[in-house]
Amino acid sequence: MKRVYIREKEGKIELVDALSHDVISTFDSVSEAVGYAVKNHYQLPVQAFNGEFVTDKEGNYIYPGEKHDFEYADGTLLEDARLCPKCGWVAFWEEICDEDKNPRECYVCPKCGYVIECTPPPEETPAVD
């Protein structure tokens, strides 16, 4: 399935091939472009709850994975990512400091800042001999 994305350029909406960046077609509205993509079996990026197409921190579109949760347009697995239950964006695994200034690894949503699924604090982790 060909992966595509939608962009606005000079007042028009373009449906663009995600790998070659060639314009497939031009539309008057996003809904027309989405309809065309669905009708032609193109895969659009993941959409957040507000309808925005989801990108990573560098602006690369994120697609539903065929074998994994998320992938880039070229099929590369997007590792250490989860769907944010608050806004629908993609939360990434990163190290943060908790309220006691202890480092913890959590999924953090870059869009809304929601923090999910943190590793337990050191005092809650059993010691291993």
Image (cartoon, rainbow, N blue to C red):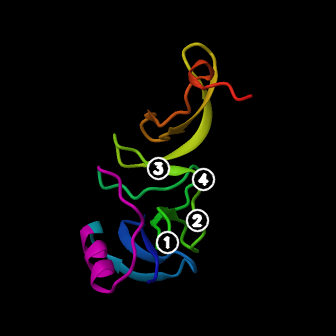
Residue range corresponding to the magenta coloring: 31-49
Does the CB distance between marks 2 and 1 fall below 8 Å? Answer: yes
Give the number of the mark in front: 3 or 4: 3
Tag shown at residue 58: 4
Between discs 1 and 4, the one toward the N terminus: 4
How far, Cα to Cα, is label 3 from label 1? 15 Å
Q: Is residue 98 above or below residue 17?
A: above
Whole-angstrom CA distance, mark 1 to mark 4, is 23 Å
Q: Which of disc 1 and disc 2 is earlier in sequence?
A: 1
Q: Which residue is mark 3?
A: 82
Tag 1 secondary structure: loop
Mark 1 Cα shell of 10 Å, populated few (<14), some (14-19), many (≥20): few
Q: In terms of secondary structure, where does tag 3 sit?
A: strand
Which residue is situated farthest in the right direction here? Answer: 129
Per the image, the residue denoted by label 1 is: 67
Q: Does 20 lie within the magenta span?
A: no
Secondary element at tag 4: loop
Q: Is residue 54 left or right of residue 39?
A: right
Labels 3 & 2 near each other (Cβ < 8 A): no
Q: Quadrant of the N terminus?
A: bottom left
Marks 3 and 2, Cα distance to the nearest angstrom?
A: 12 Å
Instruction: State the residue position of label 2.
Output: 77
